[in-house]
Image (tube, rainbow, N blue to C red):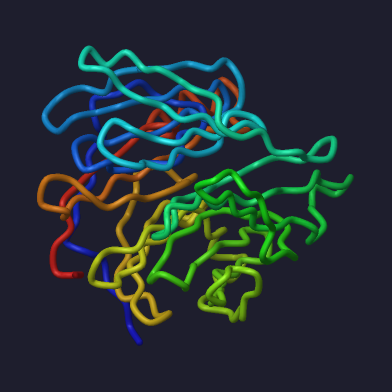
């Protein structure tokens, strides 16, 4: 099946440049994202500039909106509940601390339709930079119960639910987007390959699913976001930075794309030469829904 560029045109939003922008989310009222490296949490209401509302000072891997102004933040190995006051002051309350082996990380995560929070664990890299497939998906139920229903991943990344029992999940190192179908108790999964991105095309990273079933996938290293239907790429949206980390769909009419990028690994010269790297971009999407 042939693919074509989308009619979407992305522009930088009014926000500071990040080192590693990630986890874009729409909470029904405003956009959110992180600068992972320093744990900076940004909020941007439509028509307004972004505001830094929290800085943890340490690695924070994902945000999961619960409702407008209420989110879960993964901060190191902790999950905290954030509540935003009318003046945008953020109250961060402890919720769950996960036990991870030395050198392991939490990475991307999301909220499931049943209210549970899911997050991928990532093992440390070996000397050649590759990671063993020892990571798992961790489920934190609303009562705080922690389980690991499925494992065997090296670099767990984007997660998004397509229905109440089906989760799309990226393992960036293998280039595979998995489709996990869980039993009613979320104790077992039938996992199949939904999509594979060849290594020469970049790494699959964050993803999002629209109400109409379109899967948006960030392709790190390729400078693009892809729109996918039934496992087939139907459109590609160019992004003005190669390291595209994640995508979100939302806005007042649920028709805008928010795309985060990174400049991780850049020295000062490359950072100056590629000023768009680390910026956040937005634009309307048409003809793809």
Residue 218 at x, y percent in the picture: 43, 55
Q: Nearer the viewer, residue 164 or 232?
A: 164
Residue 55 at x, y percent in the picture: 48, 16
**View extreme (right): residue:** 127
Q: Nearer the viewer, residue 168 or 83?
A: 83
In this rendering, the count of numbered labels is 0
Residue 155 at x, y percent in the picture: 67, 54
Question: Left or right of 37: which side holds 280?
Answer: left
What residue do we see at 59% from left, 71% from top?
198
What residue do we see at 89% from left, 45% from top?
127
What residue do we see at 51% from left, 78% from top?
194
What residue do we see at 33% from left, 78% from top?
229
| 213 vs 266: above or below | below
Question: Left or right of 4: which side holds 247?
Answer: right
**View extreme (bottom): residue:** 1
Question: Left or right of 108: which side holds 156?
Answer: right
Residue 243 at x, y percent in the picture: 49, 44
Give the position of the N terminus as an image quadrant.
bottom left
């Amino acid at each position: 099946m042939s693919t074509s560029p989308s009619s979407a045109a992305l522009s930088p939003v009014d926000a500071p440049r990040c080192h590693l922008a990630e986890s874009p989310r729409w909470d029904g009222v405003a956009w959110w994202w992180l600068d992972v490296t320093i744990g900076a949490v940004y909020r941007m209401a439509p028509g307004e500039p972004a505001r830094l509302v929290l800085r943890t000072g340490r690695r924070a891997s994902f945000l999961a909106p619960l409702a407008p102004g209420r989110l879960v933040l993964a901060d190191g190995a902790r999950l905290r509940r954030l509540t935003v006051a009318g003046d945008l002051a953020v109250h961060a309350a402890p919720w769950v601390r996960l036990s991870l082996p030395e050198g392991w990380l939490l990475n991307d995560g999301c909220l499931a339709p049943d209210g549970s929070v899911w997050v991928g664990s990532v093992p440390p890299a070996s000397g050649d930079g590759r990671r063993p497939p020892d990571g798992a998906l961790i489920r934190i139920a609303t009562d705080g119960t922690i389980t690991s229903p499925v494992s065997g991943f090296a670099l767990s990344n984007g997660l998004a639910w397509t229905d109440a029992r089906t989760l799309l999940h990226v393992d960036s190192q293998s280039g595979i987007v998995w489709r996990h179908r869980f039993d009613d108790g979320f104790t077992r999964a039938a996992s199949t390959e939904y999509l594979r991105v060849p290594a020469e095309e970049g790494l699959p990273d964050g993803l999002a699913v629209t109400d109409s079933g379109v899967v948006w996938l960030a392709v790190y290293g390729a400078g693009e976001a892809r729109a996918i239907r039934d496992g087939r790429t139907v459109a590609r949206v160019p992004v003005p930075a190669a390291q595209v980390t994640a995508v979100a769909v939302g806005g007042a009419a649920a028709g805008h794309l928010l795309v985060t990028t990174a400049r991780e690994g850049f020295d000062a010269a490359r950072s100056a030469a590629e000023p768009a790297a680390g910026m956040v971009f937005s634009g309307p999407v048409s003809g793809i829904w």
